[in-house]
Image (cartoon, grey):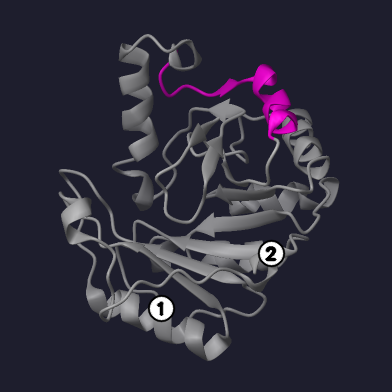
Amino acid sequence: MASSSIEWTEMTWNPVTGCTKISAGCKYCYAEVMAKRLQAMGVDKYKDAFKIRLHEDALQIPYTWKKQKVVFVNSMSDLFHKSVPLDFIKKVFLVMNENPQHTFQVLTKRADRLLEIHRELKWPHNIWMGVSIEDHRVLHRLDLLRQTGARTKFLSCEPLIGPLPNMDLTNIDWVIVGGESGHKARPMNPDWVLEIMDQCKSAGVAFFFKQWGGTNKKKNGRILNGRTYDEMPEQYL
């Protein structure tokens, strides 16, 4: 586990590490860069860099937390990757089921597999399920998410690399928007952000603006319309 600088969570928990690219949003994957850096530092968990690895020992970690936590699950992987066995996914869900005092945020780009196996998983209120939607080419992930049994559903529009007009936000509880960061960051048009914010407002969906991104994300900050937007789902309030 590790405390996190990600604005919408408190900490990360990675029972799986490693992934493969699946869509345009993956092009400059921060997790891949970080995994290679950790491998170079000699961190055993990342000895295979960004290859898929399951970490059975990590399954016990949430049982040791004494205070309530908001936890991003698998920030360094995708729990619904085809190389992660269903039995292991069930083990991760059992841990989350048995620790209802914590809020677990799970995010995937593999919405098709999520839908395929969602009935084999238990979905209490403390498990929030999200999909990444970087542009209109992967908007189908939203519809797949909507069909799952997750109680709290969210979208992560980061890195936002294209407009997302006319989204159907029915049964979506939360939308996160953020620009890409890093030396090769693709630009994000402010109009795309404002359009998503207006859609959230019209649909009564919590809106969280994470960052403008760019080559210097700290300098660019996260101010939108003169303020920050840190809305969370009602389930969290």
Lower sequence index among marks 1 and 2: 2
Which amino acid type is shown beneath numbered disc 1? Answer: Ile
**Label 2 element class:** strand
x and y, in percent, of residue 170 in the image: 64, 80
Q: Picture quarter containing residue 124?
A: bottom right
Q: Is residue 31 left or right of residue 231?
A: left
**Residue for badge 2:** 152
x and y, in percent, of residue 79 in the image: 61, 38
Q: Residue at x 36, y 82 (%)?
A: 195
**Label 1 element class:** helix
Q: Picture quarter containing residue 134?
A: bottom left
Task: Assess disc 2: are there few (<14), some (14-19) or many (≥20) residues with their C-alpha within 10 Å of its C-alpha.
Answer: many
**Residue for badge 1:** 196
Q: Residue at x 39, y 74 (%)?
A: 164
Magenta residues (range): 48-65
Assign the C terminus to one quadrant of the image: bottom right
Q: Is residue 166 left or right of residue 41?
A: right
Q: Residue at x 58, y 28 (%)?
A: 16
